[in-house]
Amino acid sequence: MVIALVGAVGAIIAALANPLGIGETEVFGWLQWTGVIGGIVVALLGVAIASEWVPMGRRTDVATGSQNTTIVEDSRTERRAP
């Protein structure tokens, strides 16, 4: 959800650049359009990830391993004492 908030804030800042005094001209310029569109894309991507519409890899605990982990031990060699 953090990604969605970052995108939304970015789009809002880009849209309000002129009233905030950080815009270059009095008109809505191409940099503002790029910021608004980019912010909306990032916000939508964040919503898609948060809603699990986009499958993301799950983290597994290192101690337990994952389902596809195979541990092979060689019984022909002797284990050395520490």
Image: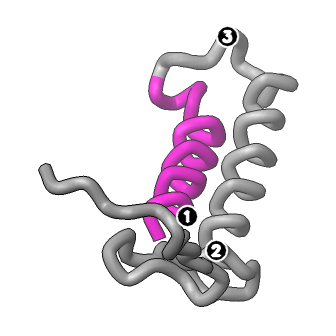
Image coordinates for residue 19, horizontal then vertical, percent: 52, 30
Disc 1 to disc 3, C-alpha distance: 27 Å
Q: Determine crowd level at label 3: few under 14, some 14-19, many 20+ residues with C-alpha closer than 10 A.
A: few
Q: Secondary structure at mark 1?
A: helix
Residue hosting label 2 = 57
Residue at horizontal 16 percent and vertical 55 percent from the top = 81
Q: Earlier in the sequence, mark 1 or mark 3?
A: 1
Which region is colored magenta?
Answer: 1-20
Judge left or right: residue 35 versus residue 63: right
Disc 2 to disc 1, C-alpha distance: 19 Å
Q: Are marks 1 and 3 in contact (CB under 8 Å)?
A: no
Look at the magenta stretch and give its main secondary structure: helix
Q: Which mark is residue 24?
A: 3
Q: Is residue 46 above or below residue 16?
A: below
Q: Determine crowd level at label 2: few under 14, some 14-19, many 20+ residues with C-alpha closer than 10 A.
A: few
Image coordinates for residue 39, horizontal then vertical, percent: 67, 48
Q: Earlier in the sequence, mark 2 or mark 1?
A: 1
Q: Amino acid at mark 2?
A: Gly
Q: Determine crowd level at label 1: few under 14, some 14-19, many 20+ residues with C-alpha closer than 10 A.
A: many
Q: Amino acid at mark 1?
A: Ala
Judge left or right: residue 80 versus residue 9: left
- In this orientation, which residue lies closer to the viewer: 55 or 76? 76
Residue hosting label 1 = 4
Residue at horizontal 78 percent and vertical 23 percent from the top = 31
Task: Classify residue 56 by image quadrant.
Answer: bottom right
Residue at horizontal 67 percent and vertical 10 percent from the top = 24
Q: Earlier in the sequence, mark 3 or mark 2?
A: 3
- In this orientation, which residue lies closer to the viewer: 43 or 50? 50
Q: Amino acid at mark 3?
A: Glu
Q: Residue furthest left?
A: 82
